[in-house]
Image (spheres, rainbow, N blue to C red):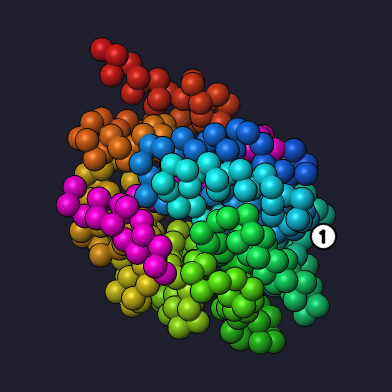
Amino acid sequence: MERLFEPLAIRGLEIKNRICMPPMVCYGWVGDDGLAVEKNVEHYRAAARGGTGLIIQEATCVTKEGRICRDQLGIWEEEQIPGLCRITEAVHREGCPIIVQIHHAGVVGGTTQHAYCPSDFRCVKNGEEKTGYEMSLEEIRQIQDAYIQAGRRAYEAGYDGVELHGCHQYLMCQFFNRRVNRRSDEYGREPERFALEILRGIRALTPKSFIIGIRLGAFEPALADGIAHAKALEEAGIDFLDISYGFQGMDEPEKPEDFPYRDVIYGAAEIKKQVHVPVFAVYGIQSPQMAEDILMRTGVDMVDIGRGILVNQNWAQDAQAGRDTGRCLDCKTCMWRVNPDKCAGRVLLNRRRAG
């Protein structure tokens, strides 16, 4: 594991290895108020204790109306700061940095009938038809300010930085994708503008040491667009690019036939060739050997180990010690979300260790 356990610095923040726990929403844990609960605190504490180099907290919403669902963590008001402080304090006590992903669902949200979108747009999300209405300039500025104030709250809550959620069909992603964003004004002609103005706004309210990264679609809709967005964000001062899928269904993923991993990992590799800031790769990275090979083969700087850490919170420590890390079995119904102790991957790992 020559590369996986090398340290990395992002904007002066020392990260002890190249393993990132990416944002994964824990449905059903919080109430309609979006306040963090003890289960959130212990979830992130355990991942930090297990040796993860960096934690990016699950999508945490910047407005109550912009949620994916009614049980999503929030960062839209001051009353949510104390609960978020408990998460950051717990993680920092374990010697791990933590960044919070700030998010607005836009047209694919699940809690409002009047959903925002750059343009009038209809799509299907999880089998349900969604309708978005074109935002006015005043509405754009209001939502941008919600992101900016969320960034300020994140700093006050003790996070080391924020990750803007700019992929997975959500609002910022909708601005990036020209098949969804059909505006004729500056926010259509410059699809990065919505995100760039938020980046600059958060930067103005936080110290120089505060990290601002983005989860960005590689294919938005094509790889050339993802690369253009990445370059524009780097020029504006983004600190890292966490590459994933953009507006799926309105994109054109690609990879060479001989590339051994997912197209989105190929996309991250191609983006890394064009920028100097750290780039993260994600999707189906199941073993330390696979993670090491991706780092070496693609030149990316970090790997996102998501479901592997859900199965085994000590994934990083076990990888470094050469022990079996276990793996997600990709069950049709994810039992981890129902009861982590009944997660099939976790049960199998424990059985192998006991035997």
- Residue 13 part of the magenta-drawn span: yes
How many marks can you see?
1
Residue beneath the point at 50% across and 82% down = 236
Front residue of this view, candidates 331 and 39: 39
Against 169, residue 47 (above or below) is above
For residue 2, side relative to residue 211 (left or right): left
Per the image, label 1 sits on a secondary structure element best described as loop
| Range shown magenta | 1-30
Q: Is residue 5 above or below residue 318?
A: below
Q: Quadrant of the C terminus?
A: top left
* Residue pointed to by mark 1: 114
Our reading of the magenta stretch's main secondary structure is loop
Query: Residue 346, located in which quarter of the rendered image?
Result: top left
Residue at x-position 37% and y-position 49%: 53
Q: What residue type is labelled 1?
A: His
Residue depicted at 62% across the width and 48% down the height: 85
